[in-house]
Image (tube, helix red, strand yellow):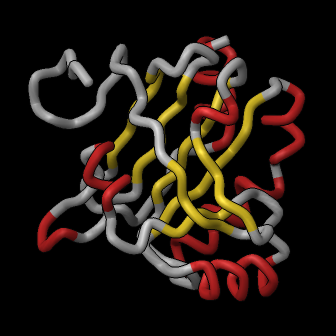
Amino acid sequence: MARKNGKGAVGVGDTAPDFRLPGTGGRHWSLSEFRGRVVVLVFYPGDDTPVCTRQLVCYNNELAQFAELDAQVLAVSAQDVASHEAFAAKHRLTMPLLADVDKAVHRSYGVLGVLDLPRRSVFVIDPAGIVRYAHRAVVGVTYRPVDELTAAVRAAR
């Protein structure tokens, strides 16, 4: 895959790397299955951590806004499916939570930081599979607001 930014990290204008990961709902999920729709791809550091919980509960509570724009939200972290299922049940999360335990997808998107730790990151991928919005948090104590992401979705349609 050619990366236009030359830094080895996926950026705006690049083709989003496809993946197939196990996740909640007892199935595997892939980026390519959503071709033709906008995808909001959320990388979060960990299940049941304070900021991640607030972030995913916030996004989950606003899934109708994404659905109105025909956008699919997918959340990825390095925990296993059992952890994701417990986290989703505890907080009534209905968006797919995907398990990237070997961090291969994290690496392909360039979202690993110091000591190989995941960085809170969000990508908006257009219907053709091109990244139209990319944000990687430096510290990760905050997350992107829903209105910013829905604006990026509108622009990517």
Residue 81's place in the image compared with 32, above or below, is below
Q: Position of residue 39 (x, y in %)?
A: 63, 33
- Locate residue 106: give its quadrant: bottom left
- Answer left or right for 112 relative to 147: left
- Answer left or right for 18 relative to 64: left
Which of 52/10 is in front? 10
Q: Position of residue 147 (x, y in %)?
A: 67, 34
Residue at the (36%, 14%) spot, across then down: 13
Q: Position of residue 63 (x, y in %)?
A: 82, 46
Residue at the (45%, 26%) spot, across then down: 133
- Locate residue 81: give its quadrant: bottom right
Which of 96/104 is in front? 104
Residue 24's place in the image compared with 132, above or below, is below
Pick the quarter of the image with the N terminus.
Answer: top left
- Locate residue 73: give its quadrant: top right
Residue at the (60%, 45%) spot, across then down: 30
Number of on-image labels: 0
Pick the quarter of the image with the C terminus.
Answer: top right
Residue at the (39%, 35%) spot, across then down: 17
